Amino acid sequence: MYLTDRQIRERLPAFNFTAEDGAPAFDPDTQIGPCSIDLRLSLVYWTPKRSPRRRPVIDLEQSRLMELSPYRGWDRHRLKLGEKLTLKPGEMVLGRISETFSLPPDCAGAIEGRSSYARLGLSVHASGGFINPGWRGHMPLTLINHSPNTIRIPVCTPLCQLMIVALGEPSEADYAARTDRKYLNDIGGPSYWWRDKLLREIREAVSNTNLPKNVFDELDELLVSWDDVEVLERLEEFVSDAKHGGFGNADELLDAFSKVEDRKDASAKRIDFAGQWSWALLSSIAIGVALFSVPGAVKVLLGMVAALSIVVALASIGRSRPDYLTTTRLMTLRSRRDSSRLNP
């Protein structure tokens, strides 16, 4: 049974609707309809990265990806109020709903596109509209322009409707209790289909140690937006190591893991440093030798190239490496987690 407008208003605090930063606040008076809730397009969206080579093949039998993480194939964008998202004919963009919300254990949900936009040839999700009891986060949208015309959508446009389905009784194990809950605290965006097996392995590794049972929950909450497969695999190996079984909580575990990641990050930076300077030095030597055997105008050009190569090498030194969970990045994740707890 779908909840009516009166029932939705009565239970509104349980759904915890919160607009993202930069967007207008959730407005029950304008967004709650007869038996649905209008939800708006987020300021954040993702587009496929352009590649000069052929498109990669995604094998759905491959659960552990060593070469491809979902976010690596997508560019993240953020618009401002008043700006528009442009969809060309046949184009697909991964968007999300501006509001975050939760579903209590005795309710499920369903997202449907609005008829006005469907008649323009715009679909807002390709299946995936069902929402489990216990889920919370930004509901993802798969925006596809099926029309022959370019469509421009202002951010915060109410693109879809949420219907809330009352269950006969609370679910025995809602989404938050599942071991494969890869979309709890969902931020929208690219698929986490690869994460099922990996999360089960991390949970199993935790259960085989003397760590408290809630450690996996804490790890999951902290790393929900982490999209690098190799880091998660290294974490699973770290937890599985017998000598790492003496931690009392998730923070102690991650503190130790991040120190290992610090050493790997520092080692990778040293290798990059040596390679960059070697490249710059060799280029400068080669160009310097050439300067003695070419006309004056060419000498000037080669000198500019040599100077540019050195500048590029210098600029790349010290750049951050996104594939290590360093202590600095761990502090950032904790800050975001603590902020979300204070402002759910």
Image (spheres, helix red, strand yellow):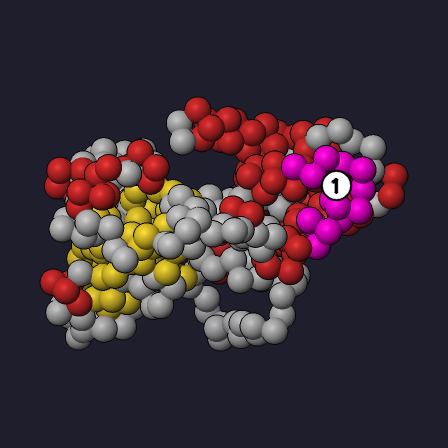
Q: Which contiguous range is marked in magenta? A: 201-214
User: Residue 106, how many percent across, how many down?
Assistant: 40, 48
Q: Residue furthest right?
A: 243
User: Residue 75, how many percent across, how many down?
Assistant: 42, 53
Which residue: 27% across, 37% down? Answer: 12
Residue 15 position (above or below residue 73): above
Instruction: For the C terminus, give its image quadrant.
Output: top left
Instruction: For the N terminus, give its image quadrant.
Output: bottom left
Query: Looking at the image, which is closer to me, 207 or 44?
Result: 207
Q: Amino acid at mark 1?
A: Lys
Relative side of 82 to 41, left or right: left
Query: Looking at the image, which is closer to me, 82 or 252?
Result: 252
Query: Looking at the image, which is closer to me, 267 or 228?
Result: 228
Relative side of 24 to 303, left or right: left
Relative side of 54 to 289, left or right: left
Residue 288 position (above or below residue 246): below
Which residue: 25% across, 61% down? Answer: 112
Residue 16 painted magenta: no
- Res. 210 image quadrant: top right
Q: Is residue 305 visible?
A: no
- Which element type, helix, strand or loop, lies under badge 1? helix
Which residue: 73% across, 51% down? Answer: 204
The residue singled out by tag 1 in the image is 264
